Image: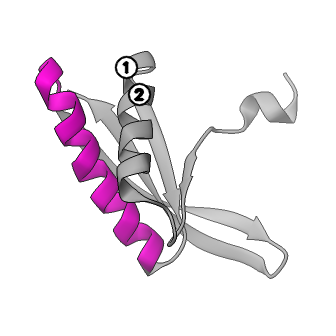
Amino acid sequence: MNEKDTEEKFLRVSAGSNAQSVGSAIAHALYETPQVKLRAVGASAVNQAVKAIAIARGYVAPRGLDLSCRPGFTTVESRDGSISAIVFTISVN
């Protein structure tokens, strides 16, 4: 197994992300996999991520699905060094 195989896949959310687009991406990903992870760096990005999760919940509700969300921290390497990011693990109940 090489390094790419062990890397986790995230939907990256930035301050400029469209919450409805991210919400739609979350919903579509959850139809294919049982769990999706979002990564957000900065307060504005976290705000967009939380809005996207609420929007995604509305998208999956007509199919009888409900979402749960577990927030956590991770470290992201950048050219300025290591920075903290919030990771939201979203799963279907």
Q: Dot 2: few (<14), some (14–19), or many (≥20) neighbours within 10 Å?
A: some
User: Is residue 47 covered in magenta?
Assistant: yes
The stretch in magenta equals 44-65
Q: How is the image coloured?
A: one colour
Identify the residue shown where x is 46% and y is 70%.
Answer: 45
Specify the quadrant of the image occupied by residue 79.
bottom right
Q: Quadrant of the C terminus?
A: top left
Work out whether residue 46 or residue 63 is closer to the camera in this orientation and state it.
Answer: 63
**Left or right of 77 in this view: 16:** left
**Percent x, y for residue 68?**
23, 40
Q: Secondary structure at mark 2?
A: helix
> Magenta stretch mostly in which secondary structure?
helix
Could you give the CA–CA distance between mark 1 and mark 2, rounded to whole angstroms? Answer: 5 Å
Q: Quadrant of the N terminus?
A: top right
Looking at the image, is 6 positioned above or below residue 53? above
**Percent x, y for residue 67?**
22, 36
In this figure, which residue is indicated by the disc labeled 2? Answer: 28
Identify the residue shown where x is 38% and y is 65%.
Answer: 48
**Percent x, y for residue 87?**
47, 55
In this figure, which residue is indicated by the disc labeled 1? Answer: 31
Q: Secondary structure at mark 1?
A: helix
Instruction: Identify which amino acid the numbered label 2 is placed on.
Output: His
- Residue 80 is labelled as none
Specify the quadrant of the image occupied by residue 64.
top left
Instruction: Identify which amino acid the numbered label 1 is placed on.
Output: Tyr
**Percent x, y for residue 82?**
72, 74
